[in-house]
Image (cartoon, rainbow, N blue to C red):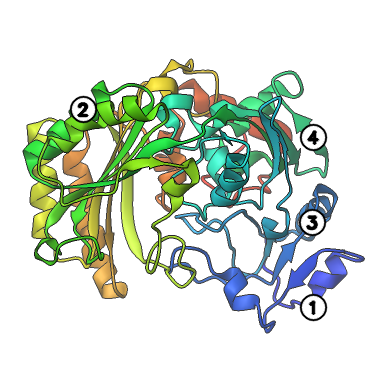
Amino acid sequence: MSSLTDADTIEQLLPGFAGKVIRPGDAEYDKARTGFYGDIDRRPAGIVRPTDASQVVQVVAAARDGGLELAVRSGGHSIAGHSVVDGGIVVDLAAMRGLDIDAEERTAWAQTGLTAGDYTTAAAEHGLATGFGDTSTVGIGGLTLGGGVGFLSRAHGLTIDNLLAAELVTADGQILEIDAENHPDLFWAIRGGGGNFGVATRLRFRLHELESVVGGMLMLPATAEVIREFVALAEAAPDELSTIANVMPAPPMPFVPADHHGRLVIMGLVCYAGAAEEGEAALAPFRSLATPVADLVRPIPYPAMFEGEGPGGAADEDFHPTAVGRTMFLETVEQDAAELIVDRLSSSDAMMRVTQLRVLGGAVARVPDDATAYGHRRSRIMANVAAFYDGLDDRAIRTDWVNDFAADLRQSDTGAYSNFLADEGPERVRAAYPGATWDRLREIKAKYDPANLFRHNQNVPPAAA
């Protein structure tokens, strides 16, 4: 594939295109090419914002027939920078934000320019919810296609476990409506296989009754014992409780006492999707682990789980972190692993560093291994190690720290979650799709995208003819 150096030819490739085209030199260009992460600096020849699937077909055809690099952007949160490409075309779905909720049937058709926050807020007006991730500004397209791990995972499964159908624009320009009965091979593949098979323009989800949750932030001092017991409690908790334990230096937030700033804490995000009285009972053991540094857990509407992302947080448009990270799965967090986490985080002088632990199981593990392209149903704990950096020299230092830490923390589960992979090479992509999943994905890729047009993703190459 080639790059487009003369941006004026975008109009030649898209005659009569009714959507918006943003080119270098336009006032919106720099903002439109910027994703969430601040270390991605690419300059596409054009950023195209279609309003429906037929316009997406035009853009796909232009890239295919013109031999151009093509990237697809839903919310711009790709850790690997796959939402933007140098010299080619970006299909930016930001203008596609339609949402049709059938409260009686508890289903919703959603266009993929919507964010998790958009969808969650609208569904909550009907007392309903679909589980996405844990950040409001993430686009539902990329999050869903990769799997979708978040606040409701143990209660209701991954996002893909609640995906009923999809509208997909394929490399040959077809608009396919796929589900378990129509193009079942493709429907299997997009549930975990990422953007390898086309541009998802609409997704149909199952909704669950959820008037409120018991949730929020519980911040505890982080000793090895508290980390170990927090994870053990999360594993033993009812399926209605999902937790995210961020072990990190306490940031200078207004509700954090000054004498705790910079000290290691567990910034625990907890969400009990059930009755308030039962939720309080389920969370009582966590509160008893140590005297909380801060306790913001209470009965709240589900959309409030996405709040508190204020200045410097995920909902701050000016916040573009530069960070190095590695994702993995763990079987257990016993005392030795907990001590390693404390030691490594304490010994680093990175401006921010974190070990994130997400206990899985529950509804995630009740789905058969081969039911979807997400191949980690038996994995018990998802772990992420990350460090922020400042400049290229600092990046090298933090990369070594992250790699060494991850290598020492890694256990026998060698898998990886594709949505949390950075640009780490084909071996790590292969780890995201273990066993027969990889071969099956390659066969389906060869059927629907034999030329690998959709390759700016955690790429699964088509099987050889």
Q: Which residue is mark 1?
A: 8
Q: Residue drawn at (31%, 48%), measured in percent from left and top?
A: 326
For the residues marked 3 and 2, what is the alpha-carbon distance in whole angstroms?
Answer: 46 Å
Of badges 2 and 4, nearer the viewer stands: 2
Of badges 4 and 3, nearer the viewer stands: 3
Q: Does the CB distance between marks 3 and 2 fall below 8 Å?
A: no
Q: Which residue is mark 2?
A: 233
Callout 1 crowding tier (Cα within 10 Å): few <14, some 14–19, many ≥20: few
Q: Which residue is mark 4?
A: 176
Sequence-wise first label, 1 or 2: 1
Query: Toward which corner of the image does residue 70 lie, by quadrant?
Result: bottom right
For the residues marked 1 and 2, what is the alpha-carbon distance in whole angstroms?
Answer: 59 Å
Q: Does the CB distance between marks 2 and 4 fall below 8 Å?
A: no
Please, what secondary structure does the residue beneath circle 4 have?
strand
Amino acid type, mark 3? Thr
- Residue 442 can be seen, yes or no: no
Amino acid type, mark 1? Asp
Sequence-wise first label, 3 or 2: 3
Sequence-wise first label, 1 or 4: 1
Q: Residue drawn at (38%, 21%), measured in percent from left and top?
A: 362
Of badges 1 and 2, nearer the viewer stands: 2
Q: Residue drawn at (31%, 73%), measured in percent from left and top?
A: 392
For the residues marked 1 and 3, what is the alpha-carbon distance in whole angstroms?
Answer: 21 Å
The circle drawn on residue 51 is 3
